[in-house]
Amino acid sequence: MSSAPLLEVDSLRVEFKTDAGTVRAVDGVSLSLAPGERVAVVGESGSGKTVTALAVMGLLEPPGNITGGDVRLDGRSLPPLPDNEYRRIRGRDIAMVFQDPMSALNPAIRVGAQVAEAITVHDPSVSRAAARRRAVELLERVGIAAAAQRVRDYPHQLSGGMRQRVLLAMALANSPRVLIADEPTTALDVTTQAQILELLDSSRADLGLSVLLVTHDLGVVAGHADRVVVMYAGRIVEEGGVQQVFASPRHPYTRGLLASVPTANGRGSLTPIPGAPPDLSQVLVGCPFHPRCAFAEAQCLDAVPPLVELADGHCAACVRAREI
């Protein structure tokens, strides 16, 4: 696996202008994805995970706006591109599996036609019949039985797991180099969750994909990622190899997330993180996690701690990262 980044997010800032004020949803996020690598982005709802993914895809809608930083694919900056150029890249070089397949799919169009459209929009020379055959092949690839018949179904005729498979088929239609999966197992039963994750892994192995996995499920991270990025209040508070972070979390927030996960043997009590995430429409003073942190001290109120490297790519943004 090459160490040269394929996808780079550099000091990205995203703001939403609202009646309540300016919401700083993403505040200086930097991360990278190497060819063939699996990077998981984790955090509570509202931490900025999905907004970061949408910004990378060029799918932010008003009032959302990139106000700083850059997103680069193979060294090429994406945000300055006009919509028509971004559309040529989206779905061809970089694709996304969305969180809610029922809202991501058009309820009035048969699923086969939607998969075929993902092909023809990037290659108009492909005939309708050829696109349909390719759609059947893709649905078979993602494990949909009787795909030749299912292409005529509408989204409401499929189960949640099958709809998610259709979205994955659409994302893989043009053999992208980067696949962003935004909470791909939300609202699915545990058996179907495992199947979808196995499909992501096999697709990555077969096609050489780089995968950016957005999730709140640390169990998913443990089994399906090489590196993990932990976000809180629009910022990265810890990152590193999965084994590094899980074995020795250096930020109190990461420790809290891990402490709130049930163990396989059911022993021990769960320890929830007290309080709630901050209001990002307000100006935050000091470390954004300090009101909920058991390790907070006076200096935590002075400034936002920078993300510093502790050892071999393991970084944390905490003044006490070397102590806890």
Image (cartoon, grey):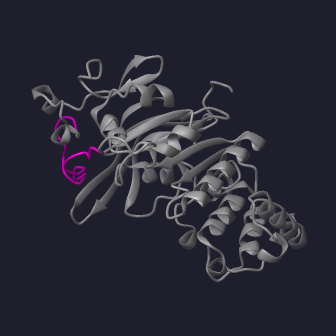
What residue lies at 22% left-to-right and 59% top-to-bottom? 21
Q: For the view shown, which residue lies furthest in the bottom direction?
A: 108
Residue 243 is left or right of residue 101, and the answer is: left
Question: Looking at the image, which is closer to me, 286 or 211?
Answer: 211
Reply yes or no: does residue 283 show up in magenta.
yes
Question: Looking at the image, which is closer to me, 78 or 127?
Answer: 127
Q: Is residue 117 above or below residue 204?
A: below
Residue 133 is left or right of residue 184, and the answer is: right
Q: Position of residue 72 (x, y in %)?
A: 56, 39
Q: Position of residue 33 (x, y in %)?
A: 58, 35
Q: Is residue 128 above or below residue 176?
A: below
The quadrant of the image that shows the C terminus is top left
What residue lies at 62% left-to-right and 64% top-to-bottom? 164
The quadrant of the image that shows the N terminus is top right
Q: Which residues are magenta?
A: 270-287
Q: Position of residue 289 (x, y in %)?
A: 23, 39
What residue lies at 68% left-to-right and 80% top-to-bottom? 154
What residue lies at 47% left-to-right and 17% top-to-bottom? 312
Magenta stretch prevailing secondary structure: loop
Residue 79 visible? The answer is: no
Residue 234 visible? The answer is: yes
Question: Looking at the image, which is closer to me, 16 or 249?
Answer: 249
Reply yes or no: does residue 76 show up in magenta.
no
Q: Is residue 107 above or below residue 239?
A: below
Q: Position of residue 142 (x, y in %)?
A: 74, 58
